[in-house]
Amino acid sequence: MSSFRATPQNAGGPVQLFYQAVDDKPCPIISHGKGIYLWDTAGKKYIDGSSGPIAVNIGHGNQRVIDAAAKQMQEVAYVSRNFFQSQANIDLANLVAEHTGAGLERAFFVSGGSEAIESALKLARQYAVTQGQESRWKVISRDPSYHGATLGAVAITGDFISADLYGPMIQPMPKISTPFSYRVPEGHTVESYALECADALETKIQEEGPETVLAFIFEPVGGLATGALAAPEAYYQRVREICNKYGVLLIHDEVMSGVGRCGHFLASQHWPNSQPDIVVLAKGLASGYTPLGAVIASAEMVDSISASGGFNHGFTYSSNPLSCAVGLAAVQEFLDHDLSQNALAMGARLKTHLQDIQQRRRVLGDVRGLGLLMAIEIVSDAATKSTFPAHTRAIPRLVEIAMQKGLLLYSRRTAEGRFGEWLMVAPPLIINSQQVDEMAAIIDDTLAVFEAEVAGENS
Ligand SMILES: Cc1ncc(COP(=O)(O)O)c(C=O)c1O
């Protein structure tokens, strides 16, 4: 029998306690959501300012998705793909392929980002083997980066904390530096540093032995690990050229940046000459209405694997009808409302507000991102770009102040703040101008309260 007893201190219940440190405050209990808003059971209203963890692209309570889920459940919620195809799977694969474009015609659906990353790694490996390139298995990635929580994903994730903890259990993969733009090494411009980081890929391939390198994976617009970092165009081109030169597959992790978040169906469509060989999607694909991810590759790649006996990989819930039906409705909703376009327009408006706030708030060091995948970097002094010491817990405190003011901002201190610290600003893509203004005003107030607290502590 469980020894758990609910008390006011652990009122979040055993599920929350599983994830939280003992001294963490329990989260409020969710009541319901509609559009960009959420309400807790105490009646407090919040703007979902980061779409959860950058997932709920079409907003909450969408009737089309609810209806599609109910219809699919009434027909059949689940069958194994080993016995039946489902129309929802076929339709979703076709719709996604229509928008990912030439070279990315085949989609395999799984239950989230980490599963999709695992699937991409195995797809790449199996393709290399079908091409007679058994010696290729190393996957180069960037440091820092985030590619998921499963052990294969941890092996390619550039996060030294995770590597310390799980390192003995995995085969660590080679890493190269991520081209940060806010702090660049002396003597560099943002562009020259980005090119140096791209050239490091070639050096790393040569060091490792080109015949052993299977793929290079990166987030074309970063998530939490880099705070919505995008690189100058030349970076994407150079990376593509290097991959071509050495026959290395280029994988884009678009778990956060995909499905319109950055203003195109894929963020990589901002750089049409630097297209990936494999793309990974999740989060916005089903907008959080159900767990769903996808690995997408060319017909040529998938056909050659099929010809060699089929993809030797899968999960019980791969391509299940319910998740596909939900994903299909979410993507149709996104397309019908041209939410890529809205992400660009509202992203520009939000960025202008944030840059304006940056002029007034000295703790706001940098505003960056593309479309509605944005981040604000927090510093103790914008002039020196210095970070707050860990013990001040600046980021959790900012999250707390914003939440008290009715705004949810996703963040945690990644890599112990070694590369800086930031809050993700990424509301649902359905946000309108007035709501953007409302959100920006709360961010301004939050920073003002935080600055006053810091000034008080220092006086
Ligand atoms: C860029 C990126 N890749 C992969 C993942 C893993 O996705 P999931 O949490 O759905 O397994 C995430 C999750 O945040 C992510 O941001």
Image: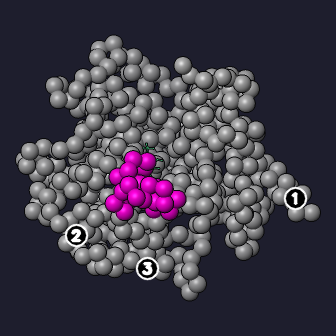
- Contact, mark 2 vs mark 1 (Cβ under 8 Å): no
Q: Secondary structure at mark 2?
A: helix
Q: Which of the pair 244/140 is nearer the observer?
A: 140
Q: Which mark is residue 159?
A: none
Say if the magenta span includes residue 76. no
Compared with 246, 298 (above or below) is above
Judging by the rendered image, the residue that carries numbered circle 2 is 212
Q: Earlier in the sequence, mark 2 or mark 3?
A: 3
Residue at screen point 9% across, 62% down? 132
x, y (%) of residue 246?
Answer: 23, 73
Q: Amino acid at mark 1?
A: Glu
Q: Position of residue 348 (x, y in %)?
A: 58, 54
The residue carrying mark 3 is 196
Alpha carbon distance from label 1 to label 3: 41 Å
- Expressed as whole percent of the image width and height from the top left, the position of residue 234 reads 41, 73
Question: Which residue is labeled 1 in the image?
Answer: 457
Residue extending farthest right: 459
Task: Tell me if residue 141 can be seen.
Answer: yes
For image coordinates 48% across by 56% down, the residue present is: 165
Magenta-colored span: 145-172
Please name the amino acid that badge 3 sits on.
Glu
Q: CA distance from mark 2 to mark 1?
A: 54 Å
Kind of element beneath mark 1: helix
